[in-house]
Amino acid sequence: MAGPRSRAKSLSSERIIEVATRICDEEDIEVLTIRRLASELGVGAMTLYSYFRSKEEILDAIADYVMGNFRLPAAEETSPAAVVRDLALAFLEMMREHPSIVRLFSTRVNTTPESMSGAFEAVIGRLREAGFKDGGAVRVYGLIVQYSLGFASYQAPRPWGRRDLSGSEELRRQRRHFYAALPRDDFPNMVGLAEDVTALPGDDQFLFGLECLIDGAMRRVEMVDGVAPEAL
């Protein structure tokens, strides 16, 4: 069985961030402390301070780690609309896999080459390849990230919207019942449209909003000469 010294020798900043990310994703950012992280790694708390000076530095590194490992979707369809759609779905998947990034995005800015390469440089490059011209590609990038981030933050505390989660169907049933049981005189719309209101944090709603976003981008963003907006 490995002792404290051997564990300390095998420690690395990458290993620390991997474990810290798992804690934040599976539990919560507030749960992450230097003491908790050291315990998970099997080392003393002071050992971590030789890698990171504070919890804030670790949170910065988590944001960089997650963004740097963003998986650019395969370029199976290359039309502008298809590229935007695939990128938005990829960002939503990343935020679901790493829910901690939703909160971290609101408090810090990525600055490392790795983080900017994976989820910034490569994505803008893909959009330019699809036909969005220069600054237009940057604007569309902003739309994709901001929309995906906003939806992910809205959906996270409303798990009945996710059909891929165990138990979500029962949660949807309970939520429909909650809306339908409201006083009809005070909430005629929510009672009458309980099914639709319950679907607001659902994936179909994300896709509906995404198609609206794509439609607007294709109409308003300048394309490279010779590349016309594609029909949706």
Image (spheres, grey):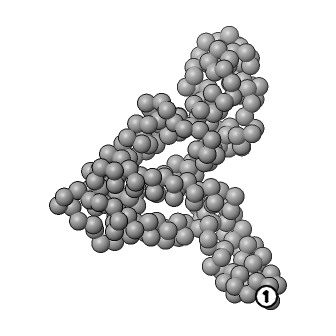
> Above or below — where is 210 with respect to 122?
below
> Above or below — where is 88 with respect to 123?
below
Residue at point 40% right, 54% down? 139
Q: Which residue lies furthest to the top in this view?
A: 5
Residue at point 45% right, 52% down? 142
Q: Quadrant of the C terminus?
A: bottom left
Residue 161 shows in this picture: yes
Question: Would residue 69 appear left or right of 129 to someone viewing this image?
Answer: right
- What x and y, as percent, mark residue 173? 71, 74
Looking at the image, which is closer to me, 90 or 188? Answer: 188
Q: Residue furthest right?
A: 183
Residue 2 shows in this picture: no
Question: Would residue 132 appear left or right of 100 to someone viewing this image?
Answer: left
Q: Quadrant of the N terminus?
A: top right
Q: Which residue lies furthest to the bottom in this view?
A: 185
Residue at point 63% right, 60% down? 155
Identify which amino acid the numbered label 1 is placed on: Arg
- What x and y, as percent, mark residue 190? 71, 81
**Count of numbered circles on the image:** 1
Q: Is mark 1 on a helix, strand or loop?
A: loop
Question: Would residue 55 appear left or right of 61 to someone viewing this image?
Answer: right
Residue at point 19% right, 58% down? 225
Residue with the mark numbered 1:
184
- What x and y, as percent, mark residue 22? 64, 38
Q: In which quarter of the image is residue 162?
A: bottom right
- What x and y, as percent, mark residue 9? 61, 12
Looking at the image, which is closer to me, 29 or 175? Answer: 29
> Above or below — where is 34 with respect to 128?
above
Quick one: label 1, few (<14), some, or many (20+) residues within 10 Å?
Answer: few
